[in-house]
Each structure stands twice: as C-alpha cells, then as structure tokens.
Amino acid sequence: MSRASLDKDPQEVAAMFDGVASRYDRANSVMTFGFDRRWRSATARVLDARPGEKVLDLAAGTAVSTSEYARNGAWCLAADFSLGMLRNGVHRAVPMVAADALHLPFADGSFDAATISFGIRNFVDTKAALVEIARVVRPGGRLVICEVSTPTFAPIRFLHAKFLRRATTLLGRFSSSNPDAYTYLAESMAAWPDQRALARIIADAGWAGVEWMNLTFGVVAIHRATKPSL
C-alpha cells in the first residue's frame, strides 16, 4: 500500500486513505486513546447543526462525524475524495459524494455550514480550499474546523513533540492496515501551523470573525468563522 508525501499530491493522498479505510476508525480511536470521540462531540456542539439546515462535512472519511452532526435533524452530506473511505461508511444513513475540496461540485451558496475534522491538513492548498468552501456556503453561513494543533502548555508541548507523535506512529503500526500511512500522518501533524497561523489563513481566504477553542491542552483546536453577508 502507498503513503503520501508532504507535497500532498491529491492522487497520492486519496490512494493512501483508500488503503487504510477498512481499519481507519479503529486506528484513530487507538492512536488518540479514545479522545477522538470527545473531540467529535465538541465539534458537533460548536457546529450546532439545526433542523432544516444543509451541512457539508468535507474530508468526512467514513462519515462518522457526519452521522453525529445529523442527529439534531440537519441534512448533512459526507464528502471525501477517497472512494475507499466512503465505501467503508456506506452503512451510515447519510448521503455521500466523492468531491475534491479545491473543485467542489456544488452551486454557490448551497450550504448553511461547512465543517472539516482532521482533514484540512491533507489539502494540497489550504487557502484555496477555504476559498472554494466559502463559495458553496451561503452569506452568513459558518465554517467549523477541528484539527490537530500546538499545545499551549510548555510541558505538554514538549511531550507532544518528543513522545506523543512517535507513539501515534507506533500505535498506527499495530492498528492499521497501512502502517507507513501513519508515518505521513505524524509528519503532517508536525508540519501543521499553530492556532493563530491557521486563523490567519482562514481570514485571508475571506472568512470573518475567526476564533478558536483549544481542546486537550491545545493538542487539538476547533476554529470557527462566518462567511460575510452580502
């Protein structure tokens, strides 16, 4: 099976996720020591998807997050460019579509909200993707991103850099069908910008009112923003 490089070639990334799809959810839970469920619940609360709303869950993988967002009655669409991931989530009762974040197959203003959980760091061009996402969200609509980040407490930051990322790679080797893919995921975590830098990228892409909330000492952060009204 393949692993992607940090150049994040879309075909490489898609092929890599196709290769890990069958055990991806289990591996995530193992590597995060079960915290993935808490982070997903926190993201759902921030998103606050409501009945009648249309929500785009981008880089949705097997649609675990999409199903959670839909519980309150919103119409939530799982979109991912890995067909393998989508196929492994077909048992979930949410609509799915194959889509590239840089070229979304939706009309302008199609959604009330868009969300990405642990997927934006795999996009080849983060700002371009955020601009494209803004196109398909209505004016006044919202964006919620949950992603790995930089711990704010120095001892946690040290442990995260020296131990936790290596532990993630090691655990991935025991729980994944493609251990090399988790080496890439650990490397992409190390290369990802911190909370403030990501907020700046989001704002530069045209989103307003950007703010963030740290989870688990900043190991993960949720960013939210609003598309300016016309």
Image (spheres, grey):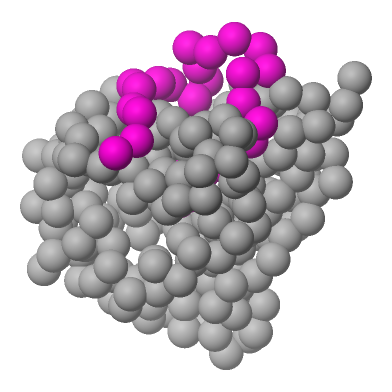
Q: Nearer the viewer, residue 141 or 3?
A: 141
Give the side of residue 12 with respect to residue 189, left or right. left
Looking at the image, residue 62 sits to the left or right of residue 126; the answer is left
The magenta segment: 93-121
From what the image shows, is residue 13 above or below residue 119? Answer: above
Q: Quadrant of the C terminus?
A: top right
Is 3 in the magenta?
no
- Which residue is at a point 62% across and 51% down the rendered structure image? 47
The residue under the point 59% across, 41% down is: 51
Vertical arrangement, residue 12 with respect to residue 215, above or below: above
Percent x, y of residue 107: 59, 9
Judged left or right of residue 108, residue 37 is: left
What x and y, as percent, mark residue 177?
9, 52
Q: How many marks can you see? A: 0
Q: Position of residue 148 (x, y in %)?
A: 51, 60
Q: Residue at x 20, y 35 (%)?
A: 90
Please name whichever residue, 179 or 140, is drawn nearer the observer in this view of the structure.
Answer: 140
Near-viewer residue (185 or 229): 229
Quadrant of the rendering where the N terminus is positioned: top left
Q: Is residue 21 visible?
A: yes
Q: Is residue 119 magenta?
A: yes
Where 118 falls versus 164 (above or below)?
Answer: above
For the point 78% across and 39% down, the residue is 226
Residue 5 at x, y percent in the picture: 33, 39
Q: Say left or right for 31 vs 131.
A: left
Would residue 5 be visible to someone looking at this image?
A: no
Residue at the far right: name it: 230
Q: Compare residues 127 and 135 and report the one nearer the observer.
A: 135
